[in-house]
């Protein structure tokens, strides 16, 4: 009987090795179907994650602008409201250079950057509350009006740390930014033009403020904005030194930036766009002009597929993909 049972069991049960091919085939089929679904979804929103990203640059936000670098609170609100209307979603500079562009499908990333750590960007009162009409206050107001639009931005600081000279007050400002989801970046200690300076001078300017930020906010900046947009003699000096290691160095103009997945991307020289209307040189090279151009040329603009694990783009753009992102690619 035992022998018969063994024979019967052998006849009724399929060997495990016989099941494996079916299991692998099913897994492959599911993988193929999943990829096809992702391609269909990417095509539906015309995703183009090899497109260009506007990295916008502000300095002071003041009631009475004195230079073309200044914006009034009303102008700054209008800048942000336009971005909301045109489906731009803020990401930090660090997220951009890391390729972690996690925004909804059909939306476009924008990087909001602020140079020089001015009190007009962030001032806290005695209760630790953000002062009205500062850049941070306006960012949060606009975000509150538009659910899903996050108040993300990158602040590039120098030793003039939001007008504070007392170490505890400097730490309070930086920790507030860190705790509220903002990025703190390096803008050199003294805002000196790095062009033509020795490697030692470059490393001192970048490394000392980086060390200060680290001691105050317990973080190491991962991106830097170069003063006046000028690169040092060897552009790599801005990325890596004895006391720092940045993943991206940002310039001061004049075009949208290539996506980090594109062959055109250069981590040591990422362009930014000055926030301003079409006046003078800004008729072509500032935010209003470039946002108009991107709106008229949607095939050139970065549009997300909503999946941070893929790089989706129309098949005809395949030659522009950096080889290091081949495994992420999702051409459709």
Image (tube, helix red, strand yellow):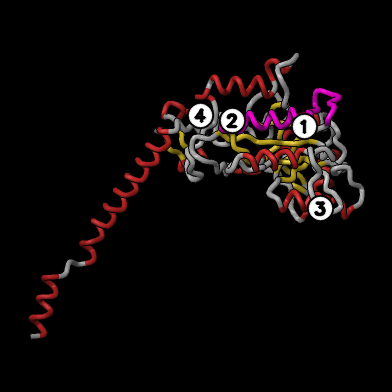
> Looking at the rendered structure, which numbered label has been put on residue 128?
3
Which-is-in-front pick, marks 4 and 2?
2
Give how far across and how far down residue 179 sits, in percent: 72, 53
Residue 74 lies in the magenta-colored region: yes
> Looking at the rendered structure, which numbered label has been put on residue 330?
none
> Looking at the rendered structure, which numbered label has been put on residue 85?
2
Can you say which quadrant of the picture contains the N terminus?
bottom left
Q: Earlier in the sequence, mark 4 or mark 2?
A: 2
Whole-number angstrom distance, CA of label 3 to CA of label 1: 21 Å
What residue did someone put label 1 on? 73
Q: Earlier in the sequence, mark 1 or mark 4?
A: 1
Whole-number angstrom distance, CA of label 2 to CA of label 1: 18 Å
View extreme (front): residue: 145
What residue did someone put label 4 on? 320
Residue 285 lies in the magenta-colored region: no
| Residue at x 51% of width, y 36% of height | 304
Answer few, some or many: residues within 10 Å of disc 2's Cα (few below 14, many 20 plus, some between 14 and 19): few
In the image, 178: left or right of 24? Answer: right
Give how far across and how far down residue 166 sits, in percent: 92, 51
């Amino acid at each position: 009987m035992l022998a018969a049972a063994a024979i019967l069991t052998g006849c009724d049960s399929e060997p495990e090795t016989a099941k494996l091919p079916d299991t692998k085939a099913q897994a492959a089929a599911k993988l193929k179907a999943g990829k096809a679904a992702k391609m269909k979804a990417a095509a539906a929103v015309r995703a183009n994650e090899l497109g260009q990203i506007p990295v916008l640059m502000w300095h002071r936000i003041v009631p009475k602008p004195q230079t073309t670098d200044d914006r009034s609170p009303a102008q700054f609100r209008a800048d942000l409201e336009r971005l909301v209307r045109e489906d731009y979603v803020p990401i930090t500079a660090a997220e951009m250079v890391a390729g972690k562009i996690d925004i909804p499908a059909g939306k476009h990333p924008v990087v909001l950057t602020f140079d020089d750590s001015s009190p007009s960007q962030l001032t806290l009162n005695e209760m630790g509350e953000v002062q009205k009409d500062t850049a941070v206050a306006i960012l949060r107001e606009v975000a509150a009006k538009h659910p899903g639009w996050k108040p993300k931005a990158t602040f590039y600081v120098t030793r003039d740390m939001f007008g504070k000279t007392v170490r505890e007050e400097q730490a309070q400002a930086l920790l507030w930014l860190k705790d509220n989801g903002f990025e703190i970046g390096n803008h050199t200690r003294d805002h000196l033009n790095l062009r033509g300076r020795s490697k030692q001078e470059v490393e001192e300017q970048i490394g000392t403020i980086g060390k200060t930020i680290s001691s105050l906010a317990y973080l190491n900046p991962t991106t830097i904005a170069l003063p006046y947009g000028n690169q040092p003699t060897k552009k790599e000096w801005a990325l890596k030194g004895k006391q720092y290691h940045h993943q991206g160095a940002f310039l001061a103009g004049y075009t949208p930036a290539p996506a980090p997945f594109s062959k055109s991307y250069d981590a040591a020289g990422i362009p930014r766009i000055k926030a301003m209307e079409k006046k003078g040189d800004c008729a072509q090279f500032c935010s209003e002009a470039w946002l108009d151009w991107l709106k008229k040329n949607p095939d050139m603009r970065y549009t997300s597929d909503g999946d941070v694990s893929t790089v989706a783009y129309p098949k005809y753009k395949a030659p522009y993909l950096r080889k290091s992102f081949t495994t992420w690619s999702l051409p459709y």
